[in-house]
Image (tube, rainbow, N blue to C red):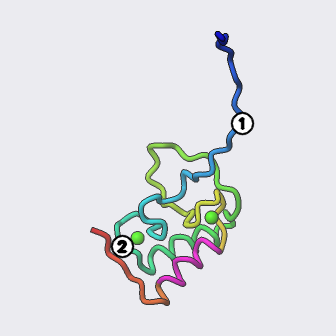
């Protein structure tokens, strides 16, 4: 039996990855290869500017910090809390 080729449409997919998420070092907000209090501070400063919420589109050439530590597309206190919790747990990491 010979089958005729036919075109099938795939369902729409939503890309869940956030461009504001540091894929290799999620808690390294300022992307300097060290997870430190500065990462928390950078995140807190943005929240204090009233910029919490859905993150805008990010220019691929942007060198802005990776505010979205949990990769959900939003910048909110949970992103900063993840850094603070890691630091409180004694995790100050230098990534080589
Ligand atoms: Ca850092
Ligand atoms: Ca987030």
Q: Which numbered circle lies on residue 42?
A: none
Q: Name the residue under label 2.
A: 34
Q: Earlier in the sequence, mark 1 or mark 2?
A: 1
Residue 81 included in the magenta stretch of the image: yes
Whole-percent x and y of residue 44? 58, 74
Which span of residues is magenta-colored?
Answer: 78-86
Secondary structure of residue under mark 2: strand
Whole-percent x and y of residue 19? 54, 51
Q: Residue at x 54, y 56 (%)?
A: 20
Give the vertical position of 12 relative to 67 (above or below): above
Residue 38 located left or right of residue 6 = left
Residue 90 located left or right of residue 51 = left
Between 42 and 74, the residue placed more toward the observer is 74
* Ligand 2 quadrant in view: bottom right
Q: Residues within 10 Å of mark 2 (few under 14, many from 20)?
A: some
Q: Which residue is drawn at 64% across and 55% down?
A: 55
Q: Name the residue under label 1.
A: 12
Whether label 2 lies within 8 Å of ligand 1 gets the answer yes
Between 75 and 4, the residue placed more toward the observer is 4
Secondary structure of residue under mark 1: loop
Whole-percent x and y of residue 75? 64, 64
Residue 24 included in the magenta stretch of the image: no
Quadrant of the frame with the N terminus: top right
């Amino acid at each position: 039996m010979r089958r005729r080729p036919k075109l099938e449409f795939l369902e729409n997919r939503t890309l869940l990855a956030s461009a504001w998420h540091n894929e290799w070092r999620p808690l390294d907000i300022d992307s300097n290869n060290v997870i430190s209090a500065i990462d928390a501070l950078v995140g807190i400063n943005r929240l204090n500017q009233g910029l919490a919420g859905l993150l805008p589109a990010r220019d691929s050439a942007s060198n802005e910090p990776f505010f979205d530590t949990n990769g959900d597309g939003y910048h909110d206190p949970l992103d900063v809390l993840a850094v603070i919790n890691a630091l409180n747990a004694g995790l100050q990491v230098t990534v080589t």
